[in-house]
Image: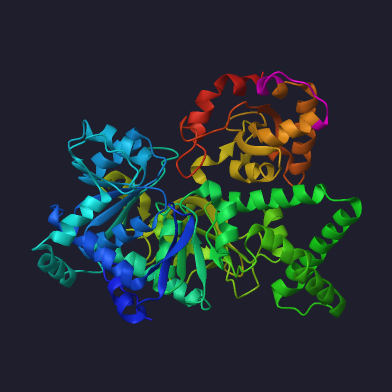
């Protein structure tokens, strides 16, 4: 199957597939899932493209899409590609200042705003911006507030429907489509500095489709993928377009908070997710098991043990399991494991791409034990997502690795064990950032900033962000993400930030899972007046000490958390302690909690 320019894909697929469904979305009016065919999508794309032309958007202009996941933003994005306009996706939770920075950096004149929150932030920026001139409000319920520069999505589309001249210009631009077209500028989340716009061209996306075609041979038009992660993130964005290229139906999840309900309604065969999603599944299942009767609890633990032995000790290496073990596993697969998957809504799942952070070995082993085909991978915005991943059809994966290197992607290990990349999916650099570009490449290889190594089988193991690697005052190196990943699998720990740089020992700021902790306090008859009061209770502190000791038994002594502080509020993007992709901003956290940190070293 030939890879088609994203500016033509809707029209080519409409000819090929016609009324076959390409997208599904929940209609807010009646809470029912509706289908969009390729023919309908192609018509929407053409109308939006005509409207862009009619409103004066020129070739190679930048247009931002500031929205949660919606079927409409896929049509807008493809329309931009169809008329050689670059899209700049923004996270739906971005603040006005974050939007303003990107508008100024990319010289954005027009923004599509998904719902009221995004619209209001755009209007804040519009008041003083020298670049932003127009805001298109996608959701029909958005209150425009009499803004002359704002227009509803329906009125915007009328410009294209009623235009007498846009069609000819559209046809001309279609003839000029090129694999060198600048498709997207995706801004990095900026954990250690200001965000940078990653340049991704059509050639990057088309190569990504090509190499996934080679690796994922069993993806067919019978599959259904749930678009759950933000489409502003390269992982979900590249995956969604790959699915559309493969004629996979994509169900667009608009509200991440309703994911449990949506999973049961949609029952996808595939879905991208980050490790935190699977950690929540792991904690939820184990919490449920703990509530069972002693006999049922013993049966469930035995089933998981059987699954681990069969799937990880035999099937993973292509070895035939003993007859008795295999029969036990097949029994549990058709009973307990089947019920478990159905309750979650993943009973039809074939495989699940998982990336964005490290998945703990404990969670990974559990998921494979009960039959979830987790396809762990590693990638960056700068590599158009996937650099390596488990092969979902080849069971010989290594639990602590990020899988096999993708076809036609080159990886080598440089100075300080830095992972270096080369290939057609790799960005040419950052928009308007010559200094960053000079620092990001060495002899034609892209510097990821991640430390890792290749196993003798050629699989990639990612250890840590080099800039985040801590060195204690005793000269020992500590990888904070590795320690944190051990802690946050506990149902009583929601977030953890490790402290160790130039310190005598490792400490941690712990954000408890408040709901679980309050239930524990109630069952333990611990009285308290407030969450702050509860977190200072000696019984609670002792409770966490015991759990943290158990969680880090596999770590070296110098890596283990010696002291910790329980925090009464979580880290969030709103207080600038997390990026919009929910990564810790360690420098900000250290500043905000300087007093608490120093107290752990007195």
In the image, farthest residue toward the front: 30
Q: Residue furthest right?
A: 295
The residue drawn where x is 13% and y is 56% is 54
In the picture as drawn, the residue positioned furthest to the left comes out as 165
Place residue 234 in its image quadrant: bottom left
Q: Viewer-proximal residue, 250 or 32?
A: 32
Residue at 82% x, 59% y: name it: 300
- Can residue 133 be seen in this snapshot? yes
**What is the span of residues highlighted in magenta in the rendered image?**
523-533
Answer whether residue 193 is magenta in the image: no
Q: Is residue 52 visible?
A: no
- The colour scheme is rainbow
Q: Nearer the viewer, residue 147 or 230?
A: 147
Tell me the quarter of the picture where residue 576 sits: top left
The answer to which of 398 and 43 lies nearer the viewer is 43
**Main secondary structure of the magenta stretch:** loop
| Image quadrant in which the C terminus is located | top right
Q: Is residue 180 left or right of residue 552?
A: left
Q: How many marks?
A: 0
Question: Toward the viewer: 90 or 54?
Answer: 54
Residue 317, placed above or below residue 158: below
Q: Position of residue 351 (x, y in %)?
A: 59, 68
Percent position of residue 475, x then y: 62, 36
Q: Is residue 404 above or below residue 301?
A: below
Hey, which quadrant is residue 18 in on the image? bottom left
Taking the spot 16% from the left edge, 69% from the top edge, the residue there is 176
């Amino acid at each position: 199957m030939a890879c088609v320019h994203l500016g033509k894909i809707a029209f080519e697929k409409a000819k090929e597939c016609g009324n076959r469904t390409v997208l599904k979305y929940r209609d807010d009016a009646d809470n029912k899932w509706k289908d969009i065919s390729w023919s309908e999508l192609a018509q929407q794309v053409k109308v939006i493209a005509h409207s862009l032309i009619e409103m004066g958007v020129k070739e190679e202009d930048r247009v931002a899409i500031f929205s949660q996941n919606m079927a409409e933003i896929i049509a807008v994005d493809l329309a931009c590609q169809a008329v050689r306009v670059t899209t700049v996706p923004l996270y739906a939770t971005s603040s006005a200042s974050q939007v303003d920075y990107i508008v100024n950096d990319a010289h954005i004149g027009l923004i599509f705003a998904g719902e009221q929150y995004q619209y209001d932030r755009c209007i804040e920026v519009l008041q003083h911006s020298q670049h932003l001139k127009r805001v298109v409000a996608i959701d029909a319920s958005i209150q425009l507030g009499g803004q002359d520069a704002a227009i509803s999505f329906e009125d915007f589309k009328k410009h294209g429907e009623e235009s007498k001249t846009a069609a000819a210009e559209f046809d001309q631009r279609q003839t000029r489509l090129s694999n060198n077209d600048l498709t997207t500028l995706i801004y990095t989340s900026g954990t250690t500095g200001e965000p940078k716009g990653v340049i991704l061209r059509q050639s990057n996306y088309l190569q990504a489709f090509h190499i996934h075609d080679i690796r994922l041979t069993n993806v067919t038009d019978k599959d259904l993928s749930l678009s759950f992660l933000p489409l502003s993130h390269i992982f979900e964005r590249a995956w969604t377009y790959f699915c559309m290229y493969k004629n996979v139906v994509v169900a667009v999840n608009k509200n991440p908070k309703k994911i449990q309900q949506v999973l049961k309604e949609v029952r996808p065969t595939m879905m991208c997710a980050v490790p935190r999603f699977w950690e929540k599944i792991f904690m939820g299942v184990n919490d449920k098991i703990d509530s069972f009767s002693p006999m049922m609890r013993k049966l469930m633990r035995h089933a998981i043990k059987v699954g681990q032995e069969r799937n990880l000790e035999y099937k993973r290496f292509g070895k035939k399991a003993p007859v008795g073990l295999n029969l036990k596993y097949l029994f549990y697969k058709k009973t307990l494991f089947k019920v478990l998957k159905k309750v979650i809504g993943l009973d039809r799942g074939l495989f699940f791409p998982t990336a964005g952070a490290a998945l703990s070995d404990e969670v990974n082993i559990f998921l494979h034990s009960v039959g979830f085909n987790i396809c762990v991978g590693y990638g960056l915005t700068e590599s158009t997502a996937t650099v390596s991943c488990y092969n979902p059809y080849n069971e010989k994966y290594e639990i602590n690795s990020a899988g096999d290197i993708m076809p036609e992607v080159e990886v080598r290990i440089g100075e300080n064990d830095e992972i270096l990349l080369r290939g057609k999916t790799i960005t040419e650099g950052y928009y308007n950032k010559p200094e960053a570009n000079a620092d990001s490449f060495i002899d034609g290889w892209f510097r990821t900033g991640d430390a890792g190594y290749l196993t003798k089988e050629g699989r990639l193991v990612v250890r840590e962000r080099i800039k985040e690697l801590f060195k204690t005052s005793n000269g020992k190196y500590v990888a904070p993400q590795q320690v944190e990943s051990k802690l946050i699998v506990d149902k009583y720990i929601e977030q953890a930030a490790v402290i160790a740089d130039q310190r005598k020992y490792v400490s941690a700021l712990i954000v408890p899972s408040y709901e679980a902790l309050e239930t524990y306090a109630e069952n333990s008859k611990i009285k308290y007046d407030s969450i702050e009061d509860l977190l200072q209770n000696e019984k609670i502190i002792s409770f966490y000490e015991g759990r943290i000791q158990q969680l880090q038994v596999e770590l070296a002594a110098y890596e283990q958390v010696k002291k910790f502080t329980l925090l009464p509020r979580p880290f969030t993007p709103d207080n600038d302690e997390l990026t919009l992709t929910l990564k810790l901003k360690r420098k900000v956290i250290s500043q905000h909690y300087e007093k608490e940190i120093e107290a752990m070293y007195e």
